Image (cartoon, rainbow, N blue to C red):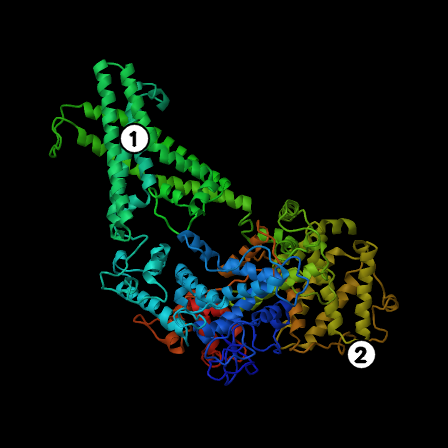
Amino acid sequence: MSLRQRTTRPAGASGAGGRGYGAGGYGAAEGEEAYNIIPIHNLLAEHPALRFPEVRAAMAALRTVGDLRKPPFIGWQEGYDLLDWLGFFFGFQRDNVRNQREHLVLLLANAQMRIQPPPDNIDALDPNVARRLRRKLLKNYTAWCSYLGRKPNVWISDKRRSATAASDYSRRDLLYTALYLLIWGEAANLRFVPECISYIFHHMAMDLNRILEDYIDESTGSPSTPAIIGEEAFLNRVVKPIYATIKAEVDSSRNGTAPHSAWRNYDDINEYFWSRHCFDRLKWPLELSKNFFAIPPDRNRVRKTGFVEQRSFWNLFRSFDRLWVMLILYLQAAIIVAWEGKTYPWENLQSRDVQVRTLTIFITWAGLRFFQSILDAGTQYSLVRRETMWLGVRMVLKSVVAAAWTVVFSILYARAWDQKNRDRRWSTVANQRLVNYLEAAGVFVLPEVIALLLFILPWIRNFLEKTNWRIFYALTWWFQSRIFVGRGLREGLVDNVKYALFWVLLLAVKFTFSYFLQIKPMVSPSKSIYKLHVVDYHWHELFSRTNRFAVFLLWLPVVLVYLMDISIWYSIFSSLAGALVGLFSHIGEIRNVQQLRLRFQFFASAMQFNLMPEVQLFHERGTLRSKFKDAVLRLKLRYGLGRPYNKIESNQVEATRFALIWNEIMATFREEDIISDRELELLELPANSWNIRVIRWPCLLLCNELLLALNQAKELVASDRGHWRKICKNEYRRCAIVEAYDSIKHLLLEIIKKETEEHKIISNLFFGFDDAIGVEKLTADYKMAVLPVIHTKLINLLDQLLKPNKDLNKIVNTLQTLYDVAIRDFPTTKRNMEQLKQAGLAPVRPTASGLLFENAIELPVAEDTNFYRQVRRLHTILTSRDSMNDVPKNLEARRRISFFSNSLFMNMPRAPQVEKMFAFSVLTPYYNEDVLFSKEQLRTENEDGISILFYLQKIYDDEWANFLERMREGMVDEPDIWGEKLRDLRLWASNRARLSVAQSGE
């Protein structure tokens, strides 16, 4: 965790003779107090989190030490809380206590915020919050105790509590929760062995119960104290021995090259606590002389207890044994059926002999089970020891039973054929022997039938797995080892049906293909080759007077293809199933700019639906009514039936929210250098300014729309209403025209000085345009064919305004030309000078030069970035001719935009309010790796003369150009980046080189 520094001194100081945990993290008496997220040591600090009453309620609940017996040899102070009390009694590290205090406050506050409806007294912690958090946090411990047949050492009732007992129970809830968190937070290594934590908590909770119940130590006659007590006692007497054991095992692994069976990892250490024998052997306090703590090369140490991996080629069969068994059995049955030579398999099965020969698959099945049992014993033999003797017994029994089934099936099958051969037909006696064979086969497949039923009814299997009754364990002992994790995690009935349907269809197609196109065509040539007798081979004959070897070579490639082509069929069907799932979930519907343009106008409503929390008044979420309502709304959004963005006014909250989120995403792209400044301007949604009356879409969506409208106005002869109706069919075109008109009007009035005659002339000119538009006489009063000329002059004006060194004379000339076109060429009715003066469109007193605007231009200063940003946007709308399908150029930026756009229309749960969301964290594994590249690392060249920075510049050339563009302020040449911008350069390179810690920091 990254620690921030507080600005006030600690609330508590160290007591005499004690370490001084303090309410804020005991006793950083010098300097400033460190904290992670909330400065809970100082309630007067100016921190946003301290304003929440839920946070203050959680902090107050932790201070309810009350009449608890105080720890011995400690100068107890008034500011100490329950975590200090536990820290003193059980010897936890001081930083651990401080961290878990913040952790627990956050958990309690978040849980209280999620209560619906809110409690009456928001300044006090709701007792149900502490109880639910304790039950949730100790859920694994409770399940572990039930699994081992032990009663949990949590002496508290989960039934309804009276008002008088609620406070005492709530304090107990907090004590158990805090104790578990302190054990969990003492060392990171313990977090990888959760059942080991449960074992430790089980005994320490018992010590806590003795303290709370005022037990007397029989040996000393004094009040009971924990078995482990003293400063940092938990670290020295519990954590260090376990850590030393794990470290020794890891060292013996020879950096992972040692056999998997030769050393224990975290899982193996944890699996030791899945047996109740751990209580008898480890004791409490931990007896370090036990063989659990023995380290290599001690042969008496505890080895693996659950699973061991033996590296072998046979794992290919053992890991997919069901698949191999199915393929082999079908191959045998298909060859037997196809050998009869008829067209369809059901015609071949009409023969009784073929039916009986097909029953040999049970002999093969039993033999494959025997082979599998031998492989299991050969790979898991190292698990067998005195403690796991029953595991070895099961291995032996499985091999014996499989071999016995093979012998039984062979004998029963041989007896049936022997009787048939003696009777020369399938007599009653022969059929009775077949019935005996089938009865044995029914008993043989009975476990598979039960497994199929449990698959169809998953809730029964979940119940059997999660129930810790010994009778169920005895019934399932033969089939699998008893493990603590992964129980009751079967999929639901609907998912099982989907899964079964997928494999039924796949296998039906695969087996049909294999029978008719692989196996059946081989029967006739095999018979022909086998019947040949006069054949001279050039190689040594393995089987004299037969052609078996030739038939074997003929079938070998076919069998290999038959066994392997299931992967091809799986790829085909998984692709089809994935496409079907994606189609129904509406994943990846927006794949290019064209589809983005079609859907973008619905983004605001979609974001309001998916990303904004719904207002809950009188209905609860998750009800059938709310789900149906959500489905209807999602359907409207997906198919454009909802309220699109163009019907939302630009000043409405919904539009503003979407613009803020979209612009924040684009700004983040720019900070990460995956888009350039120019692309940022093309992609952003500008805020409403310049009195523009429509939504200001990203320039990416408005490209080429104005030019298309100009061509339409020039070529189409129609009324104002006809023109406008055709324009309004395309929302982006309508917005481009209105925005361009309003922007030009504001721009001209902005660069011309107010209170001047020229300013009044331009105002009157636009008043005339507005009046003509209002009465729908624009096409009658003005020549639409002149619009391209005005368009060209406007572009010329914008070019002059965007130049770094602006020439006022050229700007004046351009404005004069534009004025002349608008006054003389654009109107359909010519007016003389007097008429223009009367209309306010000509100067009353012309200047000596005859030019307007000569002394009326006042350009904004260069520092007015907003003005010139709007000018660039207007220039883009007026000049863009292509569709901008390559914006943005960076593939990562395009991928992120596509992902965000698709996520707005996917099926997803409604977003909760932020304060009711569950907390999440990012754990970045860190052992020994670079966090940031140094200057020397970036410059140092390898044997090929290539440095890290040079490599990254070539791989991410567009991002490097964007980075230099972002760093251009204060830079003259590119080498200047090694100066003040060095830290930014190191961050840029570290992020591109995928240094995980650097990426997490960003």
Asked where in the image residue 610 lies, by quadrant, the reply is: bottom right
Foreground disc of the pair 1, 2: 1
Q: Position of residue 311 (x, y in %)?
A: 26, 52
Q: CA distance from mark 1 to mark 2?
A: 114 Å
Asked where in the image residue 934 lies, by quadrant, the reply is: bottom left
Left or right position of 496 against 549? right
Left or right position of 981 against 561? right
Residue pictured at 18% horizontal, 32% vertical = 549
Task: Indicate the amino acid at tag 1.
Answer: Phe
Above or below residue 619? Residue 406 is above
Any mark on residue 261, and which?
A: none
Left or right position of 574 against 732? left
Mark 1 crowd level (few <14, some 14–19, many ≥20, 10 Å Cα): many
Q: Nearer the viewer, residue 7 or 991?
A: 7
Count numbered badges in the picture: 2
Q: Position of residue 966 (x, y in %)?
A: 53, 72
Any mark on residue 362, and which?
A: 1
Task: Indicate the amino acid at tag 2.
Answer: Ala
Above or below residue 411? Residue 115 is below
Above or below residue 635? Residue 670 is below
Q: Position of residue 821 (x, y in %)?
A: 75, 64
Q: Nearer the viewer, residue 912 or 449?
A: 449
Q: Which residue is mark 2?
A: 848
Asked where in the image residue 551 lies, by quadrant, the reply is: top left
